[in-house]
Amino acid sequence: MQSLQISSTVPAKNANIFQAKRASFKRQPSRLNPTAVNASINAAASSTQTLKLTTSSSNEVTRLHLSNLEKILQKQQPLTQPSQLDLQQPVHKKGSTENKGMVLLEGLKRFWPEMKSAEEMSPRHLNRLQRLLSISSAEYSPRNNLGSRWREYHGCKDWAGLLDPLDENLRREVVRYGEFVQAAYHSFHSNPAMSADEAPQPRYVALSDRSYKVTKSLYATSSVGLPKWVDDVAPDLGWMTQRSSWIGYVAVCDDRREIQRMGRRDIVIALRGTATCLEWAENFRAQLADMPHDKQSKVESGFLSLYNTRGAQVPSLSESVLEEVRRLMELYKGETLSITVTGHSLGAALSLLVADDISTCAPSVPPVAVFSFGGPRVGNRGFANRVKANNVKVLRIVNNQDLITRVPGNFIGEDVANENIKKMLNVINNKESEWAYSHVGTELRVDTKMSPYLKPNADVACCHDLEAYLHLVDGFMASDCPFRANAKRSLVKLLNDQRSNVKKLYTSKANALTGLNLEREGLFPSSSCLPSPS
């Protein structure tokens, strides 16, 4: 029996070497081979016994090992449901050593499971995913007391040292201002139509931050109109062809506890993105136009038209904003105030025009800051210098995959690695030229590819979507760090708005955890810009 035990592991030609050295260690009996105990006793009694190696005995021992190991594996508790194992395990014919070896390998998978992919491990526990999918128990990053640092978070130092890595208090403030824009989207889509013959009625805006109250509705009017034959060809377009539309609101913090937390009373102006056909038409009017009373500053003519044009029953956006800001400044005279303008897409472009106007509307204006999401270029270098000279602080939140942030102007982008290409682009699109577009302010850059939930090849609409922006900001830690594991923002709205761009793993798990069919049911009205008519 000793010769059988050795023959299964030691070649015949090396048996004499093993025989000479085997006294230097002590063999342990194996529970896979019950004969091993007797073999070890016989080995001690007859250490000089001649080794006889045969092919037939080696095969018998191999079959014995496989049989014993198979019995042990069958006694183990299965790690998955029996029904799943029955579906996954192939049926093998008995009696074949090769087939028994296959059964052995399949059994070993229970002890060494395959390493899960990164997306399956994030989030690590399903209960966390279930919490992120909960509507009623939405979590937010903590609102710490800003106190004496509120000016720093409002941009007095251009957010130096707060962006990379992203300060947790600034992250919460950015997301909070983005939710003001979401409220503008929701309010507009709940009732987009507007009469051209009657003055608009006061509009209700459901703010997620209940410490603010809305004081003024804002309207934008296009200076262009559609041909009359459009109404004959497509009479059902309705509000999509109206010249004046509700575009945002003015709100003021009215809660003493929140005022104390923020260190001042905050006035917010929130503006939505493009929705109507005529707003899209204004977007495509990309030629630069002179700013009033400043020939060096030029802005896109379409944006300037929406900002300054009066409607049949409503004042211009410019008139409404300046009138309401002056009224609030007088109402809260003597208090510490701040003015924050926030917008997405078209609203981000108009935010710059609003902030620039407010900064010079009175002799003593409170600090003015802009938080823009997915904003296009608005004007030339002269306009950028004008905004900076008026002490308007601008924080642009930009998705690296968002094409809207690269237009109008040079579509290739401002950051080019190749020096030769960069020189050529500078000649074609000279940044110092009064006819060339230029971005304004400080940039916080996020990337769709950093999210463990979104597909890396998400489409253009997803990369520009406001909820996707807030999701990316909530998970952003630093440019060289992965998506933060303790992100608080709920995934429900992201799954609802961008389910085709969410990894299938999470849509299937969301359906299983919530019992909702996200492929068919909608939980919220869409907040993103409508697709271009083109």
Image: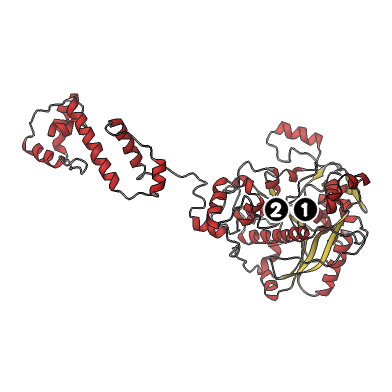
From the top left corner, tell me how far across and down residue 414 is, in percent.
73, 41
Identity, as a three-letter code, of the amino acid under mark 2? Leu
For residue 220, side relative to residue 71 (left or right): right
For residue 311, side relative to residue 27 (left or right): right
Identity, as a three-letter code, of the amino acid under mark 1? Gly
| Residue 382 appears in view | no
From the top left corner, tell me how far across and down residue 69 is, in percent.
26, 41
Name the residue carrying label 2: 466
Q: Residue at x 64, y 43 (%)?
A: 458
Residue 186 or 238: which is nearer the viewer?
238
From the top left corner, tell me how far across and down residue 288 is, in percent.
88, 45
For residue 357, side relative to residue 342 (left or right): right
Q: Residue at x 51, y 50 (%)?
A: 122
For residue 94, side relative to residue 364 (left or right): left
Q: Are marks 2 and 1 in contact (CB under 8 Å)?
A: yes
Separation of marks 2 and 1 at Cα, in angstroms: 9 Å
| Residue 528 appears in view | yes
Q: In which quarter of the image is the N terminus?
A: top left
Name the residue carrying label 1: 273
Residue 392 or 25: which is nearer the viewer?
25
Q: Residue 171 is drawn in which quadrant?
A: bottom right
Identify the mark nearer the N-term, 2 or 1: 1
Classify mark 2: helix, strand or loop.
helix
Question: Dot 1: few (<14), some (14–19), or many (≥20) neighbours within 10 Å?
Answer: many
Q: Which colour scheme is used?
A: secondary structure
Q: Residue 427 is drawn in which quadrant?
A: top right
Classify mark 1: helix, strand or loop.
loop
